[in-house]
Amino acid sequence: KVRFRRRGGVSIDMRNFDSISDVDSDAFCRVGAGVSRNRLNADLRHTGLQFMIDPGADATLGGMTASGASGTAAVKYSTMKENVLSINAVLPPDTILSANDDEDAGAVSVASAG
């Protein structure tokens, strides 16, 4: 048997943060942390674009960003680090962090190459 000692912590359910904006002319879209990779690709299908990072599971983009996901196509399409253009985060107690102060906050890059 293995015992794990928990020392507190918080787990936040991000499933309701599931918005996806339309793809703009530069092939960028804004997504919520709770959007899954498969749902994003289903929404992009009509545009001919695809989000190419594939960690092997239907992970959320927030989880993929937090863990620095890559997958089997990382050599060709890079990792989350190179595909997330900007991010907004809310930190305790009331701090809003913006990793990029431009109009594309929260945008991810999508590609048409396959």
Image (cartoon, rainbow, N blue to C red):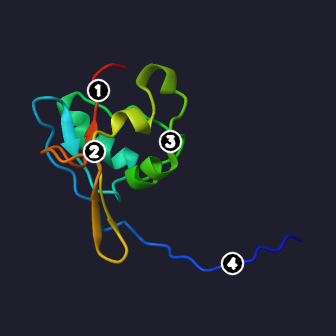
Question: Could you say whether the residue bearing mark 1 is in a helix, strand or loop?
Answer: loop
Instruction: Report the front residue among 87 and 96.
Output: 96
Q: 73 above or below 43? A: above
The residue under label 2 is 86
Question: Could you say whether the residue bearing mark 4 is in a helix, strand or loop?
Answer: loop
Q: Left or right: where does residue 94 sit relative to residue 25?
A: right
**Quick one: label 2, few (<14), some, or many (20+) residues within 10 Å?**
some
Instruction: Report the front residue among 43 and 105.
Output: 105
Instruction: Report the front residue among 45 and 2.
Output: 2
Contact (Cβ within 8 Å) of mark 2 with mark 3: no
Spatial distance from mark 4 to mark 2, Cα to Cα?
33 Å
The residue under label 3 is 69
Spatial distance from mark 2 to mark 3, Cα to Cα?
16 Å
Residue 64 locus on image (x, y percent): 46, 48
Q: Amino acid at mark 2?
A: Ser
Residue at (85%, 70%) from the top-left corner? 2
The residue under label 4 is 6
